[in-house]
Image: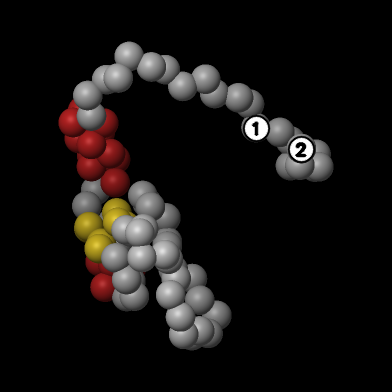
């Protein structure tokens, strides 16, 4: 998760939030948000700079993604 709050709870519910095979890494610029994360790891950083550095660290695979325009919000899902 990058730059958005991960955990928003109305009340505590015991149990596993993610399967054991999933790891969570949260990147946030808010130290308080990082401190209250109940699981996973949190990195406090400048979001824009960190994302640019991550993008620079990824080796190109020679494949480009084909993006589709999002459907209008009032359209029913397909």
Q: Residue at x 26, y 73 (%)?
A: 35
Residue on which disc 1 sits = 70
Residue 47 against residue 67 in the figure, above or below:
below
Q: Residue at x 25, y 63 (%)?
A: 41
Residue 12 location, x and y as percent? Answer: 48, 85
Few, some or many C-alpha atoms within 10 Å of disc 2 (few <14, some 14-19, many ≥20)?
A: few
Residue 41 against residue 59 in the figure, above or below:
below
Q: Residue furthest front?
A: 21
Q: Residue at x 50, y 76 (%)?
A: 9
Q: Residue furthest top?
A: 62
| Helix, strand or loop for disc 1 | loop
Q: Which one is in front in this view, the residue at disc 1 or the one at disc 2?
A: 2
Residue 60 location, x and y as percent? Answer: 27, 20
Quarter of the image holding residue 48? top left
Instruction: State which quarter of the image contains the C terminus.
Output: top right
Residue 47 location, x and y as percent? Answer: 29, 46
| Helix, strand or loop for disc 2 | loop
Q: Is residue 74 left or right of residue 24?
A: right
**Mark 1 and mark 2: span between their CA atoms?**
12 Å
Numbered circle sitting on residue 7: none
Residue on which disc 2 sits = 78
């Amino acid at each position: 998760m990058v730059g958005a709050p991960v955990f928003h709870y109305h009340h505590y519910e015991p149990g596993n939030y993610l399967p054991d095979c999933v790891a969570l890494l949260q990147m946030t610029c808010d130290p308080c948000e990082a401190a209250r994360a109940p699981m996973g790891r949190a990195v406090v950083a400048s979001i824009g700079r960190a994302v640019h550095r991550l993008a620079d660290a990824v080796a190109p695979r020679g494949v480009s993604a084909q993006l589709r325009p999002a459907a209008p919000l009032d359209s029913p899902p397909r």
